[in-house]
Amino acid sequence: LYYSAYEKAKQMLQKNHRVLEIFVEQLLEYEMLSGM
């Protein structure tokens, strides 16, 4: 059970890696601009 959940999460992260990269870039940019 644990292993299958881990594999599923890993696949989702690999598939959405570019989306996550863009999200993180936008978040960092927002934090720099807003001074948070």
Image: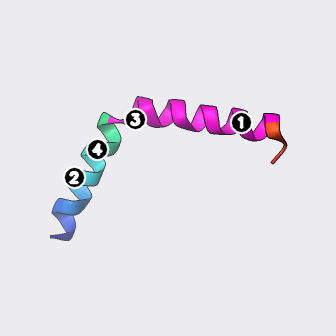
Location of residue 7 by image quarter: bottom left
Q: Please, which residue is most extreme toward the front here?
A: 34
Quarter-wise, where is residue 4 in the image? Answer: bottom left
Earlier sequence position, callout 2 versus callout 3: 2
Q: Tell me if 26 is positioned left or right of 11 in this view.
A: right
Mark 1 residue type = Tyr
Mark 3 and mark 4 residues within 8 Å of each other at the beta carbon: no
Which residue sits at x=57%, y=38%?
24
N-term mark: 4 or 1: 4
Structural crowding at the residue carrying mark 2, measured as other residues with C-alpha within 10 Å and reported as few (<14), some (14–19) or many (≥20): few
Q: Is residue 5 above or below residue 19?
A: below
Three-letter code for the amino acid on which mark 2 is drawn: Lys
Magenta stretch holds residue 24: yes
Would you say the residues marked 2 and 4 are in contact, meaning their CB atoms lie under 8 Å apart?
Answer: yes
Q: What is the spatial separation of the Cα atoms under label 3 and label 4, in whole angstroms?
A: 8 Å
- Residue bearing mark 4: 12
Tell me which secondary structure the magenta stretch mostly adopts: helix
What residue is shown with label 2?
8
- First in sequence, mark 3 or 4: give its number: 4
Q: Marks 1 and 3: CB-CB under 8 Å?
A: no
